[in-house]
Image (cartoon, helix red, strand yellow):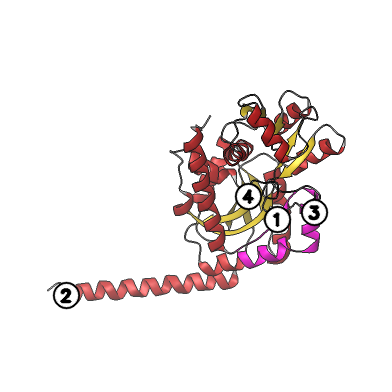
Amino acid sequence: MWTPRRKIFRLLAGIVACANLSVFDALAQSYPVKPIRMIVGFAAGGSTDTTARMVAQKLSEHLGQPVIVENRVGAGGSIATERVATSPADGYTLLLMPASGAIDAALRSKLPYDLGRDFAPVSLAVIGPYMLVVHPSVPARNVAELVALARSRPGKLNYGSAGVGSTMHLAAELFNLMAKVNTVNVPYKGGSESVVATAGGQVDMSFPTLMTAVPLVSIGKLRALAVTSAKRASLTPSIPTLDESGLTGYDRSGWFGVLAPAGVPKDIIARLNRVIGKAINTPEMKESLTKQGFEPQTNTPEQFAALIRDEIAQTAKLIKLFGVKAE
């Protein structure tokens, strides 16, 4: 006696599903019809905020709707990330996430969201190599000499970082691992403080961003030995990579990418991905990013998802090896 009811229920469910698909198709075809919010988890004026505003401006031009940057500061970016994770899956709320977001996913066990479950990656936008720099008093003019020096003085050389678990800290620990040396972390409140300490001789070395390091290198306050990316940086083409300098396979950079809440229709994700690719790779945008020490680099949603997974996995390995714990 229940069979007719089941058939009716299934028929109604099918009609609802088809209706929803039609709605999603219509949304994707007309998208966007109103302003888009790009959420940033850090204060105005920082590198994440600056990058978001550059990307948002270009997206606005290509999409024909304002893309408004909204700063939701706190908890190392996790407040902003949670806000996007719980937003409607309609493509009108996006997250500009730095690499530290993936580090947090490996470092913190009780985040109120899951990067793999609660988000739809859209595209990588830019990468930002770090630069291995030493104080001029350190008797090493290249990476090979620094490695030899560190091996001759185990535990004696130190490096400044932006805190335990920061991107700078993990770049240095990967250097330790691959070079088979033991340099000691001296954590500061931020990247600027750590590079100033290196320039002042309070620490021997550090891994600052190019934007922070280059002005101090140019006036002789720091000596640049290598960049951390797989390829040389456009801003400093004469500086070799760590990979070129003997640490084969070394590749660790900061990056920024765009994510949407899970469930956003694939057509909208594909539209956003195409537009980001066009916006980031314009000559004007490339020039602006290069001046900031960044490299424009976009990819597919699938490739960006794989990059996030790889970043989490590599970070988890470093955390396990060195016993890193969240501050």
Which disc number belongs to residue 3? Answer: 2
Which residue is drawn at the image coordinates 53% and 63% (left, top)? 302
Mark 2 → mark 1, Cα distance in angstroms: 55 Å
Which residue is drawn at the image coordinates 73% and 44% (left, top)? 226
Which disc number belongs to residue 248? Answer: 4
Q: Residues within 10 Å of mark 4 (few under 14, many from 20)?
A: few
The N terminus - image quarter: bottom left
Q: Amino acid at mark 1?
A: Val
Q: Amino acid at mark 3?
A: Ser
N-terminal-most mark, 1 or 4? 1
- Helix, strand or loop at mark 3: helix
Which residue is drawn at the image coordinates 18% and 76% (left, top)? 4
Q: Position of residue 264 (x, y in %)?
A: 50, 62
Picture layout, residue 206 above or below residue 66:
above
Marks 2, 3: nearer the viewer: 3
N-terminal-most mark, 2 or 3? 2
Which disc number belongs to residue 55? Answer: 1
Q: Amino acid at mark 2?
A: Thr
Q: Look at mark 3 in the image and give the residue it sits on.
A: 288
Marks 4, 2: nearer the viewer: 4
Q: Position of residue 254 (x, y in %)?
A: 65, 46
Mark 1 → mark 4, Cα distance in angstroms: 33 Å
